[in-house]
Amino acid sequence: MSNELSNVRVHYLDTVSSTNDVAKKCALAGEEEGLVIVAENQTHGKGRWGRRWQSPKGGLWFTILLRPPSLEHLGLISLAAGIASVRTIECFGVSVNLKWPNDIIFDGRKLGGILIEGGTQGDSYYALVGIGINLNIPKDAFSEDIRETATSLLELTSCIIPKDSFLNTLLGHFFKLYKSILSGQTNNLLEEYRRACSSIGKKVRVETLQGTIDGTVVGIAHDGALLLDICEGLTRKIQCGEVTSLRGRTVA
Ligand code: BTN
């Protein structure tokens, strides 16, 4: 595979509980950065905030193992995963945007999601970048409760997209962006992210571990955090939270 990290190793598995869990085991067993775990099926796919991630057959479910020099990079790694996904989806003629930090949204409906987990191992760090793209999934494969809020590339394009070429394209974009993060060259990533992010300029409610905050999204900080104007120019920086638009649809 041609990409920016020479030792990318893609392991294809059939059924796993969650690709993040498999990648975590590999990390703890000492696997090097660049391992990618892909599964056809996940029995216990994990979403953000402890939610379940529906993983019907036909989707692209995978996790990239990284060993960043510091967990401070996690915010930017998360934006890079979102941008790599957007670029790849756009190759197939579908224009999407990102709800901060990285929900992949088409016309208010969720086309994919990203779960980043970080941990320490001795005196070093690992990061698990779990990406789920609703690729070749027929609408009726989603359970009824999310059928109207989720979508898939099959539904949008009526085409079956080859998983391996989609994955290779996405990994190529991702590792290039990851390399730029490690070398401190993040301006282009942040500019591209700000253009792709539908949350900017919106009045939103953000659920954080410390409580709920309402405000207007005024930007994205240099480390990937959300900048929220909470009261006439008073800005709060939010590293981690769940954003809901206070106008219009709930997932936009
Ligand atoms: C979200 O939007 O809530 C994040 C969803 C992340 C889903 C992917 S699928 C591959 C990887 N393995 C998991 O269990 N979750 C992530």
Image (spheres, rainbow, N blue to C red):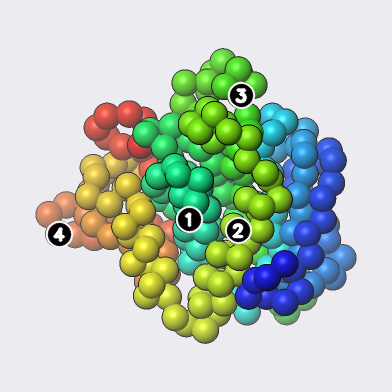
Q: Is residue 39 left or right of residue 241?
A: right
In the rendered structure, which amino acid carries the disc numbered 4? Gly
- Label 3 to label 2: alpha-carbon separation: 23 Å
- Label 1 to label 3: alpha-carbon separation: 23 Å
Q: Residue furthest right?
A: 29
Mark 4 beta carbon near ligand 1 (under 8 Å): no
The image position of residue 99, as x and y in percent, is 40, 46
Q: Dot 3 corresponds to which residue?
A: 138
- Label 2 to label 4: alpha-carbon separation: 41 Å
In the rendered structure, which amino acid carries the disc numbered 3? Pro
- The numbered dot on residue 233 is 4
The image position of residue 37, as x and y in percent, is 77, 54
Label 3 close to label 4 by CB (< 8 Å):
no
Crowding at label 3, few (<14), some or many (≥20) Cα neighbours within 10 Å?
some
Name the N-terminal-most of marks 1 and 4. Answer: 1
| Picture layout, residue 2 above or below residue 90 | below
In the rendered structure, which amino acid carries the disc numbered 1? Arg
The image position of residue 227, as x and y in percent, is 30, 59
Q: Dot 2 corresponds to which residue?
A: 169
Crowding at label 1, few (<14), some or many (≥20) Cα neighbours within 10 Å?
some
Q: Tell me which corner region of the image, top left, top right, bottom left or bottom right, holds residue 64.
A: bottom right
Crowding at label 4, few (<14), some or many (≥20) Cα neighbours within 10 Å?
few
Q: How many marks?
A: 4
Q: Residue furthest left?
A: 232
Q: Could you tell me which residue is drawn at 74 percent across and 59 percent down?
A: 36
Q: Quadrant of the N terminus?
A: bottom right
Question: Which is more toward the observer, 13 or 44?
Answer: 13
Name the N-terminal-most of marks 3 and 4. Answer: 3
Q: Could you tell me which residue is drawn at 68 percent across and 45 percent down?
A: 163
Label 1 close to label 2 by CB (< 8 Å):
yes
- Label 3 to label 4: alpha-carbon separation: 45 Å
Q: Could you tell me which residue is drawn at 52 percent across and 70 percent down?
A: 177
